[in-house]
Amino acid sequence: MIQVWSVESLPVTRWRNGGGETREIIAITGPQGSDFLWRASIATLDKDGPFSSFNGIDRVITLLEGACVTLTVDGKEIPLALHTPLAFSGDSACAARITGQSRDFNIMTLRGACSAHVAVADSAQQSRSGVCLVLSGEWQLNGSELVTGMGAWWHNEHSTIRPVSAGGKLLFCSIEEG
């Protein structure tokens, strides 16, 4: 199954701590006793604060736009660089310090069941399961055209996304199960 979406069409959920909001892209059902196998979302950070703990989950965060964000993960400060993925354990104590509103892309995977590889690409990419977000340019995914601010997710369906013209950038996440 392939599902195309735009950032603005995704449902918005405010955080309980008031520090931001999440736009969930997809949550693939996990084995019994787990919330999900893998989950993708876009978050808007409005103020400093702790991240929720997700025991048994591996996380990858990528700053998409906005102000500077510094994460403190298990006591270590890590500044996020634009379009540069950062992987960390959902078991870790994590908090964000921001200088203004920012938006990030998040992938969470059930440790031991699957893993995610996230990168910014300017050429064709393929995977059996994954999610992508067009950062710039025009792209084509299995016949569907995607432009800036649009994305897609797919699960258990081999898919290839290609740039329509030179100069485009794509945030691409492949999910490997097993």
Image: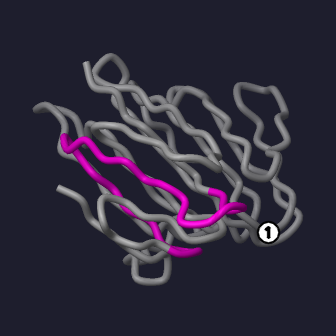
Above or below residue 169? Residue 119 is above
Q: Position of residue 166 (x, y in %)?
A: 68, 61
Q: Is residue 150 magenta?
A: yes
> Which image quarter holds the C terminus?
top left
Question: In this view of the protein, which residue sits in the foreground, 15 or 109?
Answer: 109
Q: Position of residue 25 (x, y in %)?
A: 38, 62
Q: Please report the residue visible at 41 percent of the width from the left and 73 percent of the height from the top.
A: 145
Residue 33 is left or right of residue 89, and the answer is left
Q: Which residues are magenta?
A: 147-169
- Residue identifier under label 1: 66
Q: Quadrant of residue 104?
A: bottom right
**Disc 1 residue crowd, few under 14, some 14–19, many 20+, Cα 10 Å:** some
Which residue, as the protein is rendered here, is positioned at the far bottom? 8
Above or below residue 66? Residue 12 is below
Q: Is residue 101 magenta?
A: no
Q: Say what secondary structure mark 1 lies in.
A: strand
